[in-house]
Image (tube, rainbow, N blue to C red):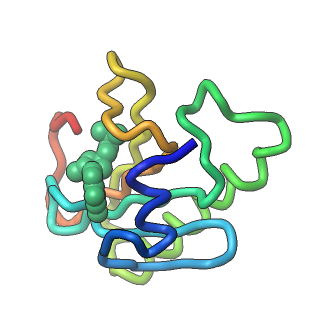
Amino acid sequence: MDSIFMKIIRREIPAAIEYEDDDVIAIKDINPIAPIHILIIPKKFIPTVNDIAEADAPLIGKLFLVAKRLAADKGVAEGGYRLVMNVGKDGGQTVFHLHLHLIAGKKLGHETI
Ligand code: 5GP
């Protein structure tokens, strides 16, 4: 299976990369809703939360560890930030490759993404 994020991981299309290791890539969202809006993406293709397997648990945990690290690096850990994972069409998911949104840098209300 393929996705726009797989193309970014393979460097077939450009992205502003904020973090990368063997398992995870984090990129700036192309259409940010806040001064800091980063997508934390597993390199393994998993379409949605519904497709997470038991064996993926460490990988999913790592998404949060990367989010925490980026929040600290960006100086928003203390002030606060939002982590969002949309699931499926009714959940607002538009890219069907699992990703965690890290949103910060302003006082957040009830924006939807
Ligand atoms: P979702 O709606 O699936 O939760 O979030 C998908 C996010 O991916 C959206 O916030 C959208 O702006 C972002 N996005 C879609 N295509 C691209 C792309 O090609 N590059 C980057 N950096 N972000 C993208």
Location of residue 110 by image quarter: top left
Q: Residue at x 51, y 43 (%)?
A: 98
> Which quarter of the rendering shows the C terminus?
top left
Q: Residue at x 40, y 70 (%)?
A: 12
- Residue 59 location in percent, x, y? 71, 55
- Residue 33 location in percent, x, y? 14, 53
Is residue 110 toward the left or the right of residue 89 in the image? left
21 in relation to 48, above or below? below
* Closer-to-camera residue (108/101): 101
Q: Residue furthest top?
A: 90
Q: Residue at x 35, y 51 (%)?
A: 82
40 in relation to 72, above or below? above
* Closer-to-camera residue (60/14): 14
Is residue 70 toward the left or the right of residue 75 in the image? right
Badge count? 0
Q: Residue at x 38, y 78 (%)?
A: 17
* Closer-to-camera residue (1/109): 1
- Residue 102 location in percent, x, y? 37, 58
Is residue 90 toward the left or the right of residue 55 in the image? left
* Closer-to-camera residue (26/73): 26
Location of residue 76 by image quarter: bottom left
> Which quarter of the rendering shows the N terminus?
top right
- Residue 105 location in percent, x, y? 20, 67
